[in-house]
Each structure stands twice: as structure tokens, then as C-alpha cells.
Image (cartoon, rainbow, N blue to C red):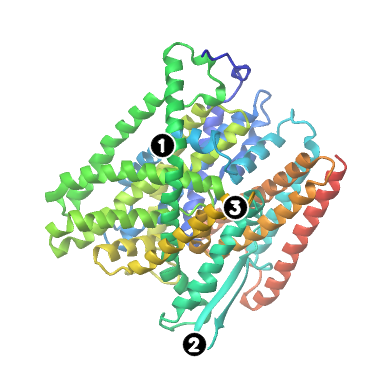
Amino acid sequence: MSVQPQANNKSRVELTIRGIIIGIIITIVFTAANVFFGLKVGLTFSTSIPAAVISMALLRKFRDSTIQENNIVQTMASAAGTLSSIIFVLPGMIMIGCWTGFPFWISFSVCALGGILGVMYSIPLRRALVTNSDLPYPEGVACAEVLKVSSTDVEGNKTGLLALIYGSIVSSVFAVIVATKVFASDVAHYFNVGNKGSVTGFDFNLSFALFAIGHLCGLAVGIAMLVGAIIGWGWGVPHFSLVEPVTSGIADLAQATWSHKVRFVGAGAIGIAALWTLGKLIKPVISGLTSAMGAARVRKSGQAATLPRTEQDIPIGIVGLITLVCCVPILYLLGYFSMTNGLGDHVAVLAIGGLAYVILMGFFVSTICGYMAGLIGSSNSPLSGVGILVVIGAALLLTIGVKPYVGPEAGKALVAFALFTTAVIFSVASIANNNLQDLKTGQLVDATPWKQQVVLIIGVIAGAAVIPPVLDLLNHAYGFAGVPGANPATALPAPQAGLISALAQGVIQNNIDWSLIGIGIVIGITLIIIDEVLKRTTLHMSIPPLAVGLGIYLPTQSTLMIVVGAVVGWYFNKRAQRSANPEATQQLGVLLASGLIVGESVVGVVIAAIVAFSGVAAPLALVGSDFETASIWIGGSVFALSIAFLYRWLSQHAKKH
């Protein structure tokens, strides 16, 4: 069958030097801010949409700029939002006493090589998880809408642009006032359950961005996350808090129980749901690889120009070559790390075995992270949950294959090797998680995939160059919680790094509670069965097991507002179906949600930078802790009224079009 030339192959401005320069600058700035923010609060945020907004503002001055060129900039800068997730692992090297700082070339190589592998792995996955998938990709869709509404050739974009602008203004102003402490950032309450000392609670994060994510995710994902939160906090925390030592207040006991017990249950549920998801994805992944090889045959036959622009990935042969080239320095890194940490007698086993684990587990977690990014967005994808599974696997393999042949003094070196291997895989997972979101955006704006893939590699290298010196600076300025000599008052918590390093130590020292992960696996299997029964016996009902696992694993601070947004978005879309133009009305809802994400994300980056440079945890605070109760009532009321106003305005304007 011959392939006919496609009209969308017309030449246009897309990959430019000016776009690359702007993208690199944004990547460097956002990476530095995200590293500090993540170490401080345990969360990183997606930089795609803020980068798109900044890019549009800068490139609008050029007459020949296009929506695709703006997309290139946001694709490159998005590396800052995800590669900085390496902070969930690397500080563990300081915490276990293996490193005293972050050696530049080793840290850079871990981030860069893992990130490039992540780009390569995501190329065949694009066809399975983006082109031939109905996953919502909430942030990818939101970013595409932001790019589209800025284009002068979008029909009727005036109302859509207003929705985007109003959403951005409301969420950004609210975020600034939250930073002053006049509005509370959370509505949280913790309390005793029964008479036996068990506790539980909830935490609604007053975040317009999380609310918008819920709107974009849809009701099924929102309800699934609510089910997970109920399992975690309605059963898990009350149940396990009975056996936790009571050494602090109710809130601290609830958080400690969730962190030390319930998260492992969630990790087990995520793990089994991930395996089930991977099993279902085998067929589309194979189909994607077959399609990629088919495209390669078209190129070899001299008909590359006949391929649609949206099907032009980096050729699969080059993908394989780059993957092999990356394996050589990774093998050297693993061997060098073994030699310098007293494991030289086993360097061959560790280097070759570690490389095999990176390649195989890297592809596994890339698939799972890509799926989760498509389900709930890359910002909310639980990379630290994936890190838990990876580090447990690495530590188990070391316990079985190496530990019996070394002395007890090598225990710390084995823990360090498990963390080091996990760090490489974490870089792979974070970039694959991000790249598929970018490729979804590209699909919606008629971009060329191979150009996005090339600039993401550039973004990975730029981000990897920034991370080590920023980490080193923060380590010397503040230190990390739990490290001997660190000041508890100023030390950065780095919660995920602490958890993952503790897991590695627990597995190798054989003092981990496997029953918690086993409970999670049982819960996950039950959820898989329920979901399959619902799909076969109802028309629309579903309860995605991975989303339930996320609801157990993530704090209610991250999940409950997503649930609220999902319900409100569902109600809005249901009413939109009765309007004169349902599709256009629902599109306005997407644009409003996109604006809410834009405003809070941009302000989040700015505030993170202010915090980083000022060295003060709350540099914009205008009131003290005695205003906390009032700030909750004021902030909560303003948040609810703002949502009501925005959706009412949206409904009124939708009737006019």
C-alpha cells in the first residue's frame, strides 16, 4: 500500500535557534527553583504551561513565530519540572553518609544519561500511549489549549482567551495572598477515632491548579482517588495509628502513620496495578514498535516526505543506537561507583547486573509513568512511588546476589549502590513521564515529534548541568533533615529521599515490614477485579486501580482537591450537554482549567525563587500564626466563591456563543 503525501508537511517555523535559547534559559531558571521547592515541601510542579506562557510573550514580537515554535520552547523547558525529581533520590547519598556533597560529573551523568534514555524509551511508547490511546493527558491538553488560544488563527478565541486570562488572574492572585498567610493554603483537621487512641484526618489544599487537574482528569479518576483516600485515611491511618508510639500531637501521629505505614500499602497497590497495566499495554506497545519500524522502512525507501508530520519520530534505528551509546557510560559509572565504594571485588557483577536492571526496569517504569501521566498529569504522577518499587527491587537483588559474598562492613556500600542505580532509573522514568505529556500537546497542535524529542534532549542536558551545583549549594547552606550536624531548624526535609534511602537500608538490613506491601497487593488485586467487573457489566462505570493506588499513596493534600475539581467539572460538562453548542462550552471549561493551572504555576515558580534567594521560608508573610484560624475561614470562603463566580461567568458566556 502506498503512502500518499500529507498536506500537513508544509514547511513552517518550528525548531529555531531563538526558541532553543529561550528554552534553555527557562529550563535553567525553573530547574533551580524546582530543586529548592521540592526539597522544601516534597513536591515539584510542571513547568510546561508557565514556559508556554513566557514563550508566547517573548516570541509574539517576531512576525514569523508559530504555535509550533512556542511548543518547542515549552517542550524543552518541561525538563525542568520533571528532571528535578531526581532530588527524591540523590540526597539519600548524603543521608546514608556515602557522599558529603554532590560531585558534578557523576551527578550530571546520572541525570543526563538517564534522561536521554527516558526520551528514547518514550518514542515507541508514543504510538501506544498517545496516538492509539484515549488517556486524558490533562496537563498536555491544557498546555495545547494555552498554545491554541494564543494563535490569531483560532476562530472565536476571544471568549476562550478571556477564560484563560481570568482563570490565570484568579489563581495567581490567590496564590500570592496565600504566600502572605492572609489566606490559608490548606483546610486541615485531624481527630481521634473511637476510644482506643486511633487517629485520622483530612487536608484540603486550597489549590486552583489541583482543582483544575481534577476538572481535566474526569469523574472516573476523581472517584477512584477518593476511594483510595478513604482506604488510606478511613481505614489505614486509624488502624495502624493504634500501634504507633504516641510521642506527639494528633496531627503528627496521623502524618507519621501515613508516612511510615500507609504509604507502603499504597506502594503495594500501585505496584500490582502497574504490573496489570503493563500487561494490558503489551499489545499496543508492540503495535507501536511495529509502526515505528514501518516508518523506518518508508524512510529507507526514500519516501520520508510522504510520512505525515505527526508520525515523524526520531528513526527507530537511531533510537536503538543512542540507547546503546548511553549504555557504555552507564556501565562505566556503575563500575566506577563500585570500585570507589569498596565493592571492587564484585565490580563485574555489579556493573553488568546494574546495567541490565537499568535497561529493563527503566523501560518498565517508563511505560507505567507514561500511563500515569496520561491518567492524572505528570505533576501528580507518583514518581516517588515508582522510586520505592525500584529501590526495593534493586536492594533485593543485591541482598540475594552480592550480600552473601561480602562482609557486614559492606552494608552501607550496598545501600549506596542501590540508591545510585535507582537514581539513574529515576531519571529515565521522570523524563519518559514528561515527554509523553509533551508529545500529547504536540499531537494537538500539529507538531513534529522528532523535533520535540531532539529539544527535550537539549533540555535534559541543560537541566542536568544545573542540578548538581544547586544541590551542592543547598546542602552546604541548609543541609538535609536527619543528617548528623544539620541544623533541625533550617535543614531541608527532602521527605522522599529520606523514605527511599530508609527503604534501601531496611531491605538490605532485613528489617522492612513486608506485610504492609503485601496488604497493598491484596487491595490492588481486589480493585483490579472490581474494575474489570464494572467494565463488563456497565456502560460507563470504571474505577482505575492505579488511580485508587495513588489515592492511598499520595497525601490528601494532593488528592482531595482533585476529587472536588473532578465532580465540579463533571457537573459543568453535564450541563454543557444541554446547551446550544456543547462542544464549545466544554472547551471553555478546559480553557478555564488551563488558566487556573497557568496562574498558580507561574506564581509558584516566582515564589520558589524568592524563597531560594531570600533564605526565608515565608518571605511574603504579613501575619503570624495567631491569624491561622481566621485565614482558614477567609481563604476557604474566597476559594469557594471564586470557583462559583468563574463557572457562573463561564455558563453565561457559553450561552452567547
Foreground residue among 299 and 464: 299
Kindly tell me whether residue 407 is visible in this rendering.
yes
- Picture residue at 44% right of the left edge, 22% below the top: 294
Residue 212 picture location, percent across and down:
66, 52
Task: Classify 260 as above or below 542.
Answer: below
Mark drawn on residue 121: 1
C-alpha separation, residue under disc 3 versus residue under disc 2: 41 Å
Residue position for label 3: 537
Residue 256 picture location, percent across and down:
45, 73
Residue position for label 2: 196
Kindly tell me whether residue 603 is visible in this rendering.
no
Residue 343 picture location, percent across and down:
16, 53
- Picture residue at 48% right of the left edge, 62% below the top: 553
604 with respect to 422 (left or right): right
- Picture residue at 17% right of the left edge, 46% below the top: 349
Q: Residues within 10 Å of mark 2 (few under 14, many from 20)?
A: few
Type of amino acid under label 3: Thr
Foreground residue among 154 and 537: 537
